[in-house]
């Protein structure tokens, strides 16, 4: 009877240890990662003194180097990254007073941001996330109309809000589908809305 009890206890303990090991194995490990992505960018109208700019949809390209803490809380894990991105939207029109003119040129934006994310669903293959970022943008606005050209540029403070879903293909590779809001101000508020697809490799 004692032998049977000891055997049963050993089986229960083995099953419990196996369950713990499996849960630990399912957790995302900590480490460095790199990512790169491309997407479409929508830019709200920008009001300036005496008028406003309207833009066509454009594109954005981004790359980042970051650190992943692994699943250290019951909510999930944290990521911190440095990101550089280039975004371009062609001018559609300029409104001055009651006049609306179709013009050439574009708004080019190069952003450098420090981003922080929280990834939910510890150990999951599909993981939703939220993020915030702060940094700087170097913006250049050019305009071409009636054979005349002009441009202006400057560097401003920029801020970011993000949400998305990550699909983990394995422990190293992941696909990211996300929304990025990036805003800044220089004589008029610039509000960017980007839909980005990225691939991430964890070391």
Image (spheres, grey):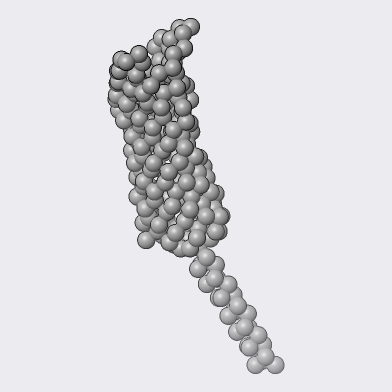
* Residue placed most toward the observer, 118 or 2: 118
Q: Locate residue 116: give its quadrant.
A: top left
Q: Quadrant of the C terminus?
A: bottom left
Looking at the image, is 4 positioned above or below residue 75? below
Q: Position of residue 186 (x, y in %)?
A: 36, 21
Residue ranking furthest to the right: 1
* Residue placed most toward the observer, 94 or 118: 94
Residue ranking furthest to the front: 147
Q: Position of residue 126 (x, y in %)?
A: 56, 55
Looking at the image, is 119 positioned above or below residue 27? above
Residue 60 is left or right of residue 156, and the answer is right
Q: Locate residue 150: give its quadrant.
A: top left
Q: How many marks?
A: 0
Residue 190 visible? The answer is: yes
Residue 31 is left or right of residue 164, and the answer is left
**Which residue is found at the position 59% from the left and 75% from the top?**
16
Q: Position of residue 183 (x, y in %)?
A: 43, 29
């Amino acid at each position: 009877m004692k032998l049977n009890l000891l055997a049963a206890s050993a089986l229960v303990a083995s099953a419990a240890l196996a369950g713990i090991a499996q849960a630990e194995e399912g957790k995302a490990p900590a480490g460095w990662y790199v990512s790169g992505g491309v997407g479409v960018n929508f830019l709200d109208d920008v009001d300036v003194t005496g008028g406003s700019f309207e833009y066509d949809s454009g594109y954005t390209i981004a790359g980042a180097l970051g650190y992943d803490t692994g699943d250290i809380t019951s909510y999930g894990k944290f990521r911190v990254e440095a990101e550089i991105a280039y975004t371009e939207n062609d001018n559609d029109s300029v409104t001055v007073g009651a006049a609306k003119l179709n013009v050439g040129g574009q708004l080019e934006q190069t952003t450098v941001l420090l981003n922080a994310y929280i990834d939910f669903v510890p150990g999951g293959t599909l993981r939703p996330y939220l993020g915030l970022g702060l940094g700087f943008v170097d913006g250049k606005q050019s305009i071409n109309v009636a054979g005349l050209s002009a441009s202006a540029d400057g560097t401003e403070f920029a801020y970011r809000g993000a949400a998305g879903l990550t699909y983990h293909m394995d422990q190293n590779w992941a696909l990211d589908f996300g929304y990025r809001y990036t805003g800044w101000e220089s004589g008029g508020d610039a509000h960017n809305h980007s839909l980005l697809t990225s691939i991430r490799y964890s070391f």
